[in-house]
């Protein structure tokens, strides 16, 4: 878990939390037509993980989508359900296939069903990551496959079971379901060149190059953010990860988008503290979700009944 000084500390023994938190809008049992997910903002660091890592507390958090869960905290008030991870991406990555694993990290052979050769695995960022940002390796010793399997069974599958259930409930009720998967990126991750001046990109909006979501909602998010004065890239370099790709099936009524947020907009990237104006970003998300819900319900026959 993370202390007030923003470093990773060992949790108390026998205090394992739920692998995710689902917050739904108040006022009835009707499923929300929009689900907002934050799979990389978890910050509960188990004791055995910290012991096995050769990184210090600050380094260990470099791949964490810090504070994204806090910035999204009010979206249920806007009418969307919110699903956030508890454990950090460095411990188990929920935006991957269930078994994308690097064989070089393990002391025993991996089962045949494991995907050992994906681009993400080769980059060190499988379901059980080999590195955090800046190519820093996490472990000082090989793992056993049973360790990875335990994390995946106890954390990965419950998160995705909840995600799938929420989407199916919404689709069955409304005729369609919509998901916005929110992440953060370091301020130096993506550079733009516009008007003769270089600078950083504020947001990257991905829809798997048009395959995961109807264009109306993609355009709404893009226009909303650009009208607010932000610079938004489309699908470059983040077109959408596993969640966006796997669950985005417009022909079956499932629409997904991924949104990357530049950390400089809301936090100090050295101290990891939220900036004093972080409420501006929090309100931006709430207003964006309200606009998405209003647009969706306008087109939804069920809402007119």
Image (tube, rainbow, N blue to C red):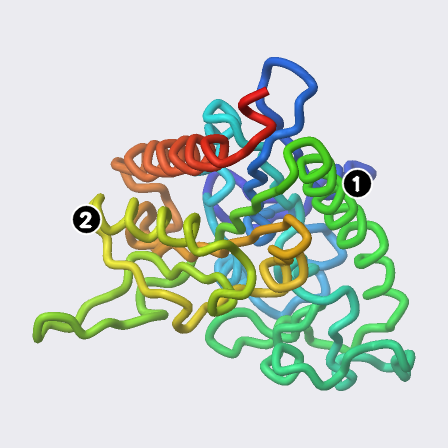
Quadrant of the image containing the N terminus: top right
State whether residue 47 is above or below residue 283. Answer: below
Residue 111 x, y percent position in the rendering: 91, 79
Residue 264 x, y percent position in the rendering: 29, 54
State whether residue 114 is above or below residue 149. Answer: below
Marks 2 and 1, how far apart at CA: 47 Å
State whether residue 293 is above or below residue 153. Answer: above
Residue 54 x, y percent position in the rendering: 62, 70
Callout 1: helix, strand or loop? loop
Relative horizontal placement of residue 33, taking residue 12 as reference (left or right): left
Label 2: few (<14), some (14–19) or many (≥20) C-alpha neighbours in 10 Å? few
Relative horizontal placement of residue 146, taking residue 162 as reference (left or right): right
Residue 68 x, y percent position in the rendering: 47, 45
Q: Is residue 270 visible?
A: no
User: Which residue does the numbered mark 1 point to in the structure image?
Assistant: 13
Q: Residue at x 54, y 23 (%)?
A: 304
Q: Residue at x 62, y 73 (%)?
A: 125
- Residue nearest the viewer, comparing 305 with 94: 305
- Residue nearest the viewer, comparing 250 with 11: 250
Q: Nearer the viewer, mark 2 or mark 1?
A: 2
Residue furthest left as drawn: 196
Q: Is residue 304 visible?
A: yes
Quadrant of the image containing the C terminus: top right
Earlier in the chain: of badge 2 and badge 1, it is 1
Label 1: few (<14), some (14–19) or many (≥20) C-alpha neighbours in 10 Å? few
Q: Residue at x 27, y 72 (%)?
A: 191
Residue 303 numbered mark, or none: none
Residue 229 numbered mark, or none: 2
């Amino acid at each position: 878990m993370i202390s007030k000084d923003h470093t990773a500390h060992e949790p108390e023994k026998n205090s394992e939390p739920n692998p995710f938190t689902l917050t739904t809008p108040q006022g009835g049992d009707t499923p929300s037509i929009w689900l907002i997910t934050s799979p990389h903002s978890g910050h509960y660091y188990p004791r055995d993980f910290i012991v096995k890592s050769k990184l210090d507390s600050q380094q260990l958090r470099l791949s964490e989508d810090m504070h994204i869960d806090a910035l999204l905290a009010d979206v249920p008030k806007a009418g969307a359900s919110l699903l956030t991870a508890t454990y950090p991406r460095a411990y188990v990555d929920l935006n991957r296939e269930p078994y994308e694993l690097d064989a070089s990290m393990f002391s025993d052979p991996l089962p045949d069903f494991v995907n050992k050769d994906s681009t993400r695995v080769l980059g060190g960022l499988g379901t059980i990551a080999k590195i955090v940002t800046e190519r820093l390796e996490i472990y000082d010793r090989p793992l056993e496959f049973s360790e990875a399997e335990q994390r995946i069974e106890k954390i990965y599958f419950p998160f995705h079971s909840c995600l799938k259930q929420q989407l199916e409930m919404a689709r069955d009720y409304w005729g369609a379901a919509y998901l916005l998967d929110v992440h953060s990126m370091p301020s130096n991750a993506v550079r733009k060149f516009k008007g003769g001046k270089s600078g950083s990109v504020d947001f990257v909006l991905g829809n798997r190059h048009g395959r995961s979501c109807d264009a109306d909602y993609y355009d709404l998010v893009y226009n909303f953010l650009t009208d607010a004065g932000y610079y938004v890239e489309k699908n470059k370099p983040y077109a959408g990860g596993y969640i966006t790709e796997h669950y985005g099936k417009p022909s079956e009524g499932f629409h997904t988008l991924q949104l990357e947020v530049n950390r400089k907009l809301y936090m100090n990237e050295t101290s990891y503290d939220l900036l004093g104006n972080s409420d501006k970003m929090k309100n931006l998300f709430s207003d964006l979700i309200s606009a998405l819900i209003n647009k969706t319900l306008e087109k939804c026959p069920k809402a007119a009944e």
